[in-house]
Structures are given as C-alpha cells and as structure tokens.
Amino acid sequence: MEVEGGSRSAGAGEDRTIPIQSGQPMAFFQFTQQNLPACKPVLTPAWVITACLLMGFIFIPIGLVTLRASHSVIEIVDQYDTECVPEVHKYMKAPIYIYYQLDNYYQNHRRNQIPNVVGFCLCICFDSKLTPRYLPESNHGLPIVPCGLIAWSFFNDTFKFIRERTELMVNRKNIAWKSDRDHKFGKQVYPFNFQNGTFTGGGSLDPSIPLSDQEDLIVWMRTAALPSFRKLYGRIEEDLDEGDLLEVHVMNNYNTYSFGGKKKLVLSTLSWLGGKNDFPGLAYVFIGCSSIIISIVFMLLHVKNPRAYGETAYLSWNRKSISG
Amino acid sequence: MVESSGRTKGKLRWSKLYSFSCFRATTGDVQELIGQPGFSRVVFGNEPQLHKTKPFKYTNNYVSTTKYNVVTFLPIALFEQFRRVANLYFLLTACLSVVNLAPYSPSSLIAPLVFVVGISMLKEAVEDWQRFLQDLSVNNRSVKTHLGNGIFVDKLWKELCVGDVVRVSKDEYFPSDLLLLSSSYEDGVCYVETMNLDGETSLKIKRCLETTLGVNEEKEFTRFKASIRCEDPNPNLYTFVGNLEFENRSYPLCPAQVLLRDSKLRNTDYIYGVVIFSGHDTKAVRNSTRSPSKRSRIERKMDYIIYLLFSILVLISFISSIGSALVLKYDMVKWWYLHLQNDDRYFNPSNPVVSAILQFIRALILYGYLIPISLYVSIEVVKVLQAMLINKDIEMYDEVTCKSVKARTSNLNEELGQVEMILSDKTGTLTCNQMEFRKCSIAGISYGGDINEVDLAASRRMNADVEAYRFSVHDSDTTSQSYEMFEFSVADINAQKAAPGGHEDMAIPILENSKISNVRKETFIKGFNFRDDRLLNKNWIHKSNSNDMTMFFRVMALCHTGIPVEDDHTDKLKYEAESPEEVAFLIASQEFGFQFCRRAQSTMVLKEVDPSSGKEMEREYKLLNLLEFSSSRKRMSVIVSDEDGQIFLLCKGADSIIFSRLGENGRSYQQETTSHLSSYAEDGLRTLAFAYRKLEEGEYQHWNLIFTKAKTTVGPQREELLEKASEMIEKDLILLGVAAVEDKLQKGVPECIDKLAQAGLKIWLLTGDKKETAINIGFACSLLRQDIKQFDISMSKEVESNNQLQAMKAEVLEKIGSSYQLMCEESNKDSPFSLVIDGKALEIALRNDVKDQFLQLAVNCASVICCRVSPKQKALITRLVKKYTGKTTLAIGDGANDVGMIQEADIGVGISGMEGMQAVMASDFSLPQFRFLERLLIVHGHWCYKRISKMVLYFVYKNIAFGLTLFYYELYTSFSGEVLYDDWYMVMFNVMLTSLPVISLGVFEQDVSSDLCLQLLTANLLHSAMQQFPALYRQGQKNVYFSWSRIIGWILNGVVASLVIFLSNIYILSPTAFRENGQVSDIAHLGAITYTCIIWTVNCQMALVITHFTWIQHLFIWGSILLWYTFLFLYGALPPDYSHRTFHLLLEAVGPAPLYWMVTLLVVIVSLLPYFLHIAIQRSFFPMDDHVIQEMKYYRKDVTENQIWLREQHNSQIMTQIGFSARVDARVQAFRGQLHQRKILIQRSVTNSPIYK
C-alpha cells in the first residue's frame, strides 16, 4: 500500500483542495469525507474512577437531604369503616393535609377512560353526541353534566374533625390544580341532570355551584395512576400537638365493601419535597454508596492488575501469538 | 509505409498465413437433428418481413434487465415489502385499527407503515429506473441494417429483428447473435473479442462459409436470400447446430460462423451478418440470470431478533389477555364503579372469552412498540446516507476515469464489513488487459531487471534488523554473509535515494515498491516498460555477443502473426495481433531497433540496425512457412529466408517445450536462462523462450515436401501429419534467451490484495483465461509463491480425450484425495497451500458427489486459482462456496462473463473502468479500479458493519426499554389495557425524540477513525489507522458485534432499564404527595415523568454507545432531550381540548416539583449503570483491538512512539499467508535461515580451530 504513498501524497494534496475550491464549504467537505473534528473520549480507569466517585459525592448528600425532608414529615394513616380516631403522635405544624386513600380501586381502568372527554365534556357539555353510550343513564336523551363514569362514581365520604369537642376548620379550597379550575372546568357550567336516575352511582353535586368551584369533583376527576391512591380532601390550618386525639366524624357513603376496597384517612404535613417517602432518599444514598464502592473496587483491581492503556500486548494478534 | 495502412490488410489472404486450419470440419451426425424438437428454428435471411407472422415470429431485439415494469411494479414490490415479517405485522395492525380494535388511532398506525413501505419501494423504483435507463442506452445503439435494394441504414438495436442483414464495423458490439456472411477480408474471416462472454483476452477467429464469401458488397444484398435452420435458443456459448440453405444447396453451420451478442469485432473493418437470435433469445442474454434481491447477513439475523421480540410480544399479550379475563370474571363484576354492561365488547362479564380474545388483539397492537417499525425506516435512511458517503469518498475517486465508487444498492453496506472470501475475475479486474515487455535474458544475461521488489522489501526489513543482529552476534562472528547482507541493503538504499523522488528516510516499513519510479518516467511507451541502458538506444551493438542479440531481436520481430498499423504522430508503428503479448514483443523489438514495418503476402520487411555499422537499413524476409501457435503445441515457428538466401527457423514458445528441443550446441546458455526464468516467473511475468535454427536449403526442401503434403491432406489424420511434420523441423534449436512480458496489473492491485489478505480475506481467482496466464497473475499478485505448495488439479490428456465421465471423475477424485492427504500431513507445519484447477476438472469437481471433497480441499488452501472457467461455472463456484462455507462472499469482475458470479455472491462488485456495463449493471457496488476495494471493505465496510449492528442493537434496547413499561403498567390497571402515556408521546418516541441520535450513530460512528496518520517520520503515508490495521476487519468476519450474546445482552439491558424506570417512578411518586402543595400525582403526571426518564435514559445510553462525537452527535442527542421538554411545554400550552391531560403539565405541575428532577437523575444513572460497568470492565480487563488502538491514538502514541506503532502494524500482518507482505516475510525467513546457518558454520569452524582451543 505504501507503494502508492509517494505518488498519492503528492496527488492527494491536490485532491483535497479540488472540491473545496469548487465552492463547497469546508465543513461540508469534511462531512462527506467523514472527517469532521470529533471528540473521541476513551473510557480510561481514571475516568471510570472519577465518574464513580463524583457520582457518590453528589448522590449521598442529595440522598441525605431527601431523607431528612422525608423524616420531617409527620403522617398519620388510619383505615376507617365507621369510626376513625387518629392519634397525633407528634407535633404537626399547619397546614396539615387531609387525604383520603382508596386501595384496590381501579380508577385507572380503561373503561373509565373510554370516552376520553373528561375535561372536554365538562366545558361544553351540551353536545349530546359524545355522551349517550357510556353514560350510566341518560334521562330521556337529556345530557348529563358532568358526564363520564368517573364523575358518576364520585367519591362522597365526608369528614368532620373534632379536637377536644371543638371542630377543626378544614379548608377545602385550593385543593385542585389551578389550571383545572381555570380552564378545564367551565365557570358557567353547572351540574345538570346528574345522579338523578334510577341507578345512582357515587355522590351528587350541588347544581347551583359551577363546576369550576366543585373542587372535590375536580380532584376526583384527576385519574389516579395506580389502584392504590390518595386524593387531597382539604387542609387543617391549625397546628396539632403531640397526644391530641382527633375525633373524625365520617359520613361513610361510598361503597367499597362490595369489592373489598379499603378506605383510609391520611393526615400529613409536607416538606419541600412533598409527602413522607423514604424511597428516593434511600435510593440516592444506596446508589451513592455503591458507586463509591465500585470506584474503590475498580481502583484496587487496577492497582493490583494494572493494564497499561494503549499497551499493544493486548491486541488480538499479539495475544494469539503469546498463547499460540 | 503508406501501403501498410488498413487497406493492405484487407487484401491479405489470412488463410494462407495460417498453415493449420483453425477449425475442424463439423461431423455430420448432429446435422440430422435439425428439424427435430429443440432444433426447429427457421430463419429467412434477408427477409425479415417473413418473421412478422407466426409461426416465424420471434422476440424482437429489445433486452430488458429491469426487475419490474409499470404494471408489475406495484404487486411485486409490495410483495417484496411484505415478505418482511415486521411489515406484515404492521399491516395487520393497520387493518385492525380500521375496524376499531386497536388502542391507537388508524392514522397513527397507517402513516408510519405507508412511510416505511413507501420509502423502500421508492428506493426500489429508483434503482430499477436506473437499470431501465441503462437498458435504454443499450437498446438505442444503432447498427447499419439492410433496408432493401442494397441500401443500408442505421437502425436501433431494439428494432432489429430476426432475418435482418446487418453490417457491423470495427470495434462495435454485435447487436444480437449473427450468422457471419462475409467480412472485409477476402477469405471471410473476422476477429472477435469475447471478453464479455468468457473473459478470454485473446481474439477468436470466426470464418464464414465459402458459399457466402461473395456477398461482401452492399449491392450484393439486393438479391441475397438464404434460409437457416438451426437449434432453438439456448444458453450454450460454445455449440451451435444448424444449416444454411443457399442457392438450393444445404451447408452445415458450426459455431465458427456465429457471432455472439456482447462480443466485439476486432481487427476487421466490417462484417455482414444475418440476425438469427435476437433479444432474449441470444445466447448471452440466455446466459444471464435475473438479478436476485440480496439481503445482508445482519438484516437476516435481524429477522430472528424480530421473531424473538414478536414472541415476547405474544407472550406478554397473552398474559395480559388471560389476566384481563380472570379479573373480568372474578373481580370486575364486583366493581360497581365501572358499571359493567353487556354492551362493551372488551369487558363483557357474560362472555369473558370473547373479551379475552379482543384484549389479546388489542394488547398485540398496544405493545407493538416492542417491534421497532422505525428501525426499518431508520436503517433505510442510514443506508442511503452511508451509500452517499461511500460515493463521495475522495480517496476512492479515480482521476483517470473520473469515476468514483458507487453503491448501487445500499442494502449491503454492512455486509461489506463481513466479507471473508473474494472471488475475483482476472482480466479487466486485476489486470488491465495490456501486456508490457518487462525483462529479457539474452545469451545468459538478464536485462531490464531492476531489483526484485520482494528482495528489496526484504532487505529493507533485514536492514532494520541487521543493526541489532550484528550486536547479537559475537564480535568475532561478524560473518561475511551478514556484512554482505548489510552492504546489499545499503546499496538498495542508495539506489533508492538516487531514484527521482525516492524516499529520503529509511523508516518506511516493509512495503516499498520500485514501481514508483516507473510511473514517473518522462516518456512512457504503451506496452513497453523496460529500462536498461545496455539494450536501449542501440547500445547493445557494442556488446561482444551482438550476433545472438540480433537473432534474438529477429525472432521477436518475425515470429508472430501481427500486422503494423500506422501511427500518425511519430515514426513509431503500432501493431495489431492476435494476442496482446505479441504486440508487446513487436513494440519492444521496435524499441530495440528492429522495426517490423510491412507484411506482404509472403514477405516481411524489417528496418533493422546493423550491429557492425550501427546504421538502420530495411531488410526483406521471405516467409516460407508458418507453424501456428496452439495450446497443445505451446510454440510457434516461422521459417524465413533472408536476403542472402539463408533459411532460418525462428521459434518461440513455452520454456519447457523449447528446452526439450534444443540441440547439443544450443544449450550454452541454458543454465543461466533457467535461473532467470524462475526469477521472472516468481515475479509473475509471462515468459517465452526464443530459439532459432539455421536450415540448409536441401533439408528445408525435403521437409517442405512432407509439410505441403500434410497440409493438403483432407481427413482426420491431417492434424497428426502436420504435427509430425512440424516435430521434424522444430528440433536441434539454439537457445537465444527468454523474454518476459508482464500482464500489466492495474494500479495498486498487489498492495490491495496484500491488505485484503491481512484483513483475513481469502482470494480466489476465477478466470476464463489460460492456466499459464492465470498462474502468472497469481504470482504477480502474490497469491502464489515459489515456496507455497501448489496443488494442480487438471485432467490428463488421455482421460480428457476419451471423454469418459467415470474415468475423469476417478482421476479428479484421486487428485483431490492425494492433495488433501498431503495437506493433512503437513497441516501442523503451518505451511500454506494453493490450488490451481482448470475448467474441465472443475466441471467434474463441482458435480454433486465430488464437490464436498473438492470444497474441503479448496477452502483449506490459502489461495485458489480456477482457470478456463465458463461464466456459468463461475456462478456455480460462487454458489457452492457460499453454501458450503456459509461465509460472506464477494465477487468482483468487469465483464458480462462475471455477471452470474456477481449476482450469485453475497456482494457483487463490478469494475466500471472498462466500457462493458453488464457487470456494473448486475453489481451491488461499482468501483472504477480494483484497488479501491481495500478502502471500500476495510474502512467503509467495517464502519458500516459496526454502525448498523450497533444501531440495530440500540433500537432493540430502546424499544424494549419503552415497550415493557407499557406492559408493567398493565399489571397495575387490572389488565384493562390503559396506556400510561399520551398518544402523542408514543408517536413522538420513535419519530422525533429518539430517531436522530440513532441515525447519527448509523452515519457517523467511527470506532477507529480514518484520520490520516500523523507519523512524523513517514510523512508520505496517507493511510487511515483502519487501513494500517486491517486485522480490525476480522471483527466483522467473526461477527463480534452482532453475536447472539450481544443481542441477548442488549435485550437484558433494555429489560433492566425498563424495570428501573418503571419501578422507581412507581415507588417515588406514589401514593404520597410529590409537591410541597400537597397534590398527588395522577396518571398524567406519572406518565410524563416516566416518559421523561425514558427519553433521558435512551439518549444517554446513546451517548455511551457512541465513541466518536462530532457536533452533530451532540446536537442530536442533547437536542432530542431538549426537544422533549419543548414538546411537553408546547403541547401543554395548547387548549385543553387538544392537550387533554397534558394541559399545563410541565409548567404548573411537574416542572416546579424538585422530585421530578431528582427522579430523572436517579433513574438515568441507575439504568445506565449496568452498561457503564460492563464497558468499563470490558475495556479495562478484556480490551478489544479497537479499544487498544483507540487508546493508542488517544495517548498519541502514534506520534510519540513511532516504533511501537510500526511494530504493531507489522505484527498485525504476520498471520497472513498470501500477499506481498507474506512473500517478504518468507524471504526474510529464508535470509535469516541462511544467515544463521552461516553463523553456525563459522562458529563451528572457529571453535574447532586450533587457535581457539
């Protein structure tokens, strides 16, 4: 091959210039010759060890901070049937968020989603073409607002919190997403013809309040992703002290017994990260520690059994001749 | 010189020049067949109008090589498309979507399918269109055709029909199979070049029937009428049975009268012929086979991956449907909130089986993301781009022909990286079909011999070692030999320095070629590449043995069948002769001062230099007899008498034949000549020995009587008598010397073969040419060398003449058997073997019951040369080799005779340099020159292989990582078939968010770059690292990057990624609040966050896969991620009617939540960790070749440690057995051996000497 070297090298210089002179930009020429300037990182042990260590040093602090945030959250979970007396075991600073939790409840079932018109229907809900088939009932062809199975199965348990015989104020405003209130659920749309057939599903709505103000409905309408889910009920805007006994008056309307679903009431404070969940913190710490261990193991292996990088003895033909 | 123009030729009666008739009379028995089935064709010569009606209506002369026509394109192309499993699956899903069973909208399923199929079909259409254009240009060539009344007009080829009389002029192709009627020569012969049919370079002589000799004027054709009865169209090139009825008499016809399409008229001004077979009936077209659509190995394996994925798909769909049915039957009925009714087909509690089936179908489509539909589109796009880059590569641009490499189908780019076997044609592919006079040995002295290239290279390498060697040898042992050796190499170096433009530095490795200086010669004479001042410029007349020299040159100038042609520009003549080798001799003799200037009927005129005076004078020689060359005689003689009446027999021929006919007094130079001969042969030169004999008048007269009598004999014993007669006179010869001509190799061929051999490729030479020529070329290309054991399988004469199948088979089998046994015995010695087989033997060897043994032997040989093979055999060998070895084969050729092989091989490469286009038309890649094959395979092939395989694996990974999350989510929705993601996310996934990085991988990835090497000391070398380490290519041959273990590995990687992504999201986001305002995540949030993780993961995975980042890769990878956020933002900004759940998702809900970003970081890191660890461990502890070379480049070792770099280059080459370097290695070994022995000898003598004691 080198035979041509001499003649080629003389000619090659010219070759290279021809296309450029003929008006093509240099970059395009480099592109067609697959000769663009490129960075070719090589994964040397130094890189591996540095990357792992760096990862460890970033992940562990994040994990610890996250864990701390999670631990700062106080959460009371209480399953209720008829009565529910959660005990505050630690001081809870306001606002305290109240959730109801349903287990083994498939709000994410596809049948719920089939006329995927949740928001749509609620705003301009007078297009009867969209509704008939999946509505539980349509009374004499009249439209139903709000429509859809999810609305029909509206959760309607209510809770009243009494601490030492005084009722705690539960703020039930601002529990839904702002965009839902402002854009999806019409301000001029009022419940109409809802839950008034022979077969009633979940809760009913006050027909005098526009949908955009029915925040518990809006929260319910947000499809839960998993069969076990919490939904925001309201907020207690008073601090709760350790040892406080809360008496919860439950209006147990919603039927979960027929399919073995569980209902729970959750009281929880929040951190900057949200609710109580140790998983992310633990995961971060675990991954951080693992990567440091990996880097140490890698370092040890490398010290014990170093491979000179770019060492030619590792080329297959050399290895073959060694073994052969 | 005026009379020696073209016209003179026409007046010659060539038949008289030849004392042997070329053709035996046809035997009568086959004639009886005419009229029988299979021999029923009737042609009315010069009456084409009779062929307008049945039953004599034959096909017209239009030849089409296209795959489709307007009508058949759609059905056939569609059928081809839906032979791909995946396409069929997507067609099915599209159909289902129309009947409302699919989870997605019909348009989102149909559009990509139409796109994929459309692009592929468009590609097919464009390729076929090109074929059509090519056909058009062939069909629109024109030929002079008889219109009537002796008027000839131009007619397009395609309009020609059977019965037409045509006139074909010199150097034109025959438009169809013609029956030769007459030619410009009085005796009705013409010369035909059949290179396109059988690859043979020497011209073939055709001869018309005596009865039609007279019709050689245009006006004669007014009343000419003849009818021809002959065989039906068939593909057999060498047979023809028919008879001509002319003037109420019937004459038998034989192949000698038939001019075949695709062959070319040479050395003859014009011929008249009548069309007997046209268009698709012609033998050449019958010989061609339809071009099959080829698929690469990776693509075929990809089908299996698709099957695998499809079975995973079916499995999880099955799980889903069963799960769904169980839930429906036992649980769902209790779920009042779903308000189950019998109206819903999917959830019909009264009929769970139907629901399960429907769910199954739905799930099949839902999880369709496991089957990467966009893979096909991406691969098509990538391959087109790759092909474009291949076409644009300036390193593969031929300045001479202004052509560049063309990938004619882009289907096979990656297959180029896996080739293990190259089947090459010779003429026009390796050689340029041009002979050059290179060397000669006259009277025992060799002339024109620059130092043998191999020796030069070997000594150069020794030189590098000698220093070290000298020190290792004891001071006292510095043998004369090693000193001599050192001197020798120094001398070379000096010579090299002195050469114009020679290399100054000596660090140039192994391969150095003295040919460079030849290229730069100021005056270049075609066919004459000889530099030796001793002979040129008439210097030879001062030599002592000028008499021998004169005789030598006379033999060269007189013993031939050539004729001079005028060259307008100079006083030098050009020559035409039957074989290019004779032309080379004539040109050489002209250069030496023996210009052959005229040939008359029985005289030859030379303008020769008189050695005594040094003046030029014309001399006339009387040509008394000409004993023609034939392959069995292997010699040719002329008997001439000079002006003084002295009679000479001048003879040239194969050395063995000549040597056996030397007289006692003629052997004076035999020993030297023999040694020269072997060195010439080693260099791949074709040699002919020259000898002469002086005849006494009486002796000649006596012999001439016998000879004339033999000549006039009619009957079977004629041949024998002539043979005997010539034996009588061609004896007691006096050896003059040998001349060596080089069948000129194309530029860069030996080096290219060398590199390819280092890359682990085996090269088989398949040629239609003679065995000797083939072997010469084998030597010239270093496919053969003297120290390789050569098996020669050919039929012995007796067996061949008996033509008995059993005996032939027995002989071939015996030869194969013994060769194989020998091979087995010596296999441990690591010595290579080569195999030479000729067409006849091959025919037997390729029979079903013999082929296994043959292939077993052939495959184990380092090189195989098949000579005298027909186009069909070439194709057959290719097919058998492909099938037997299961390895990727590449066939390369330039002529129509290679078409079969090109189509049969996994990759067909056509050489586009020559005028014939058939090979290029049938090929997958066309190269202007053979030498570009190296870069095409080793650089582009390797890259494309790696790119495509990485790309496919990544696609599999990507789709598994994404598709499985859909399935996992099903487990949480009671198998109801709910989708976690928005429809638009799904559409975007393959189309926008992950496609561009893959394409950039497929187009730009380079494991080892082709950067010009920056070696300071060898600034002359402009070769990529890849070309320096052809051994990297073996990765492709072993299919390292697309092995099942890798495929499974990537699938597992995808599974791990999908699990990590899904589970982390589920556990982190549920059920507690994910923001400080207390909101919990719903299905939209979980979907968006999970999807973000997927986009990050697959794109970062891409960044880990890529080893070569240009700004394009960066742009695509990071741009894709950015694009996702942009998309999410814009989609969310749409009114809720359009954006549904995604409304204000990013800005309001997800973006401000710190947990969202933490999840992303965590998931990306965790899901990439396994792969990262894998590559870190692999690189650190089990590095592969490309890793090490990357590292060497990275640390710039090529610059700082030049020696190592060079040494590695050398080491990587060591394993080869054929090629130039291997030859050099062998030579160095031999030198070392000698040196060592000498050393031992001296040592012994020293230690034994009394002084030492």
Image (tube, coloured by chain):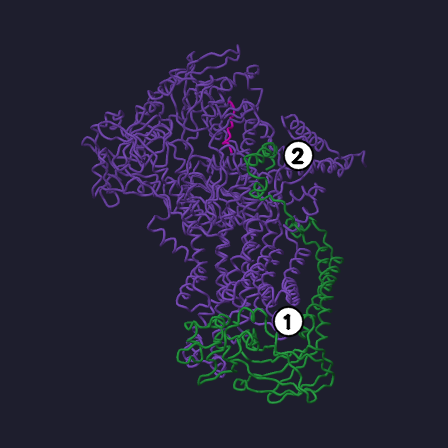
Element type at marker 2?
A: helix
Q: Earlier in the sequence, mark 1 or mark 2?
A: 2
Span of residues in magenta: B736-745
Q: Main secondary structure of the magenta part?
A: strand
Percent from the top left, x then y, of residue B1100?
62, 58
Q: Quadrant of residue A33?
A: top right
Is A14 placed left or right of B808 in the picture? right
Which residue sits furthest top? B613
* Numbered label attached to residue B1074: 1
In this rendering, the answer to whether B448 lies above or below A141 is: above
- 10 Å crowding of disc 1: few (<14), some (14-19), many (20+): many
Q: Secondary structure at mark 1?
A: loop
Chain shown green: that is: A
Which residue is at the front of the view, B483 or A322? A322
In the foreground, B421 or B1205: B1205
Q: Which residue position holds label 2?
A: B460
Q: What type is the residue that disc 1 sits on?
A: Phe
Closer to the camera, B1012 or A144? A144
Q: Is residue B1084 above or below residue B1119?
A: below
Left/right placement of residue B212 relative to residue B349 reads left
Chain in purple in the render: B
